[in-house]
Image (cartoon, grey):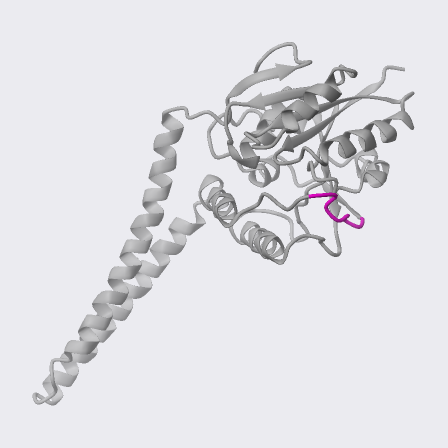
Amino acid sequence: MDKKLISFCIPCYRSEKTIGIVIDEIIEMMDKRSEEYDYEIINVIDGSPDNVYAVLKNIAKGNEKIKVINLAKNFGQAGARMATLRYAKGDFVVCMDDDAQCPMQELWNLFKPMEEGKDVSIARYPKKKQSAFKNLGSKFNNKMVHTLMDVPKEFEMSNFFIMRRYLVDEILEYKNPYPYLIGLINRATHNIGYVVMEERERAAGTTGYTFKKLISLWMNGFTAFSVIPLRISSFIGVICAFIGFVFGLVTIIRKLINPMVGAGWSSTIAIILFVGGLIMLMLGMIGEYLGRIYISLNKSPQYVVRETVNVDDIK
């Protein structure tokens, strides 16, 4: 029987102290099912300022299954994740983080929904062991996804999940900048399974997620796979126009009934400022869409590869 290949895809950033732990755990788990599965570990270094590249090069010397791709600069987790998927050759692709928080001891439990025919299997953490700031960002992102996209009610993304080969191939058809993995998965399938497990504490260091990166993630969700924000803007515009019409009508009627009524300078300025602010907000939103279209037409890359280790070709 031919062995199935499993690709472990890991974007790496500030993880020189943890990536060795993650790789050792993967190898230990794969040794338990070596008769059924072969594996490869795809590590993409996303412009990390520490020595994680040197650490990975040293580890990869003794194991050709460990592949290292060093990007030319920091392209963000979304770009690095797309790079890991593009180099992955596995029948199943496991996406995970580099901080040793993913509970690798649960790997084969995470595979159970795949054996039942699911296209994606996602770890579900009853309690996420991350900073309050990142927890808030994750909750907001999930809320945004359910509001703006056609996703199942129970959908919730995490840092540890498995996908089938066909789904990875479909995701890789997206060549534009600003990839948003949640949107790419959900536009292809809703056949998703979940496995409840406990997330682990970070083995070392702190999260690389900053407020700027969270905003970037949210903007990708807003603009990449939904036009609902534009529809909301149109709806708000209609409401404001209607309120303005009613207010103008009331003002005329009051003036006809009582010619002594003042012009109402303060209320007029307040309305102008309110409506003007809404107009600027809507123009900014439209500008964000147009800017991303312009960058896409210029074929801005998702990532650029500087050098590789144990990789046959640069993609």
Specify the farthest residue to the left: 259
* Left/right of residue 185 with respect to residue 275 in the rendered view: right
Above or below for 251 versus 212: below
Residue drawn at x 38%, y 49% is: 230
Q: Quadrant of the C terminus?
A: top right
Q: Please, is residue 119 above or below residue 241 in the view?
A: above
Residue 78 placement: quadrant: top right
Q: In which quarter of the image is residue 123?
A: top right
Residue 198 counted in the magenta span: yes
Q: Residue at x 60, y 55 (%)?
A: 139
Is 136 left, or right, of 116 in this rendering?
A: left
| Tally of numbered discs | 0
Position of residue 249 in the picture relative to residue 202 (left or right): left
Quadrant position of residue 184: top right
Which region of the structure is painted magenta? 197-204
> Residue at left 54%, top 38%?
180
Q: Which quadrant: the N terminus? A: top right
Residue 169 in view in this figure:
no
Instruction: Tell which of 76 and 170 is nearer to you.
Output: 76
Q: Where is residue 280 in the image (x, y as percent from the top left)?
A: 28, 54
Q: In this view, does 48 lie above or below 146?
A: above
Evaluate whether residue 105 shows in this view: yes
Location of residue 79 in the rendering, given as x and y in whole percent from the top left corner: 54, 31
View extreme (top): residue: 312
The answer to which of 129 and 86 lies nearer the viewer is 129
Spot occupied by residue 135 in the image (x, y as percentages of width and height):
63, 55
Residue lying at 21% horizontally and 77% vertically, measured from the top left:
267
Q: Is residue 20 magenta?
A: no
* Picture coordinates of residue 108, whole percent (x, y): 85, 36
Q: 26 or 252, which is in the foreground?
A: 26
Secondary structure predominantly adopted by residues drawn in magenta: loop
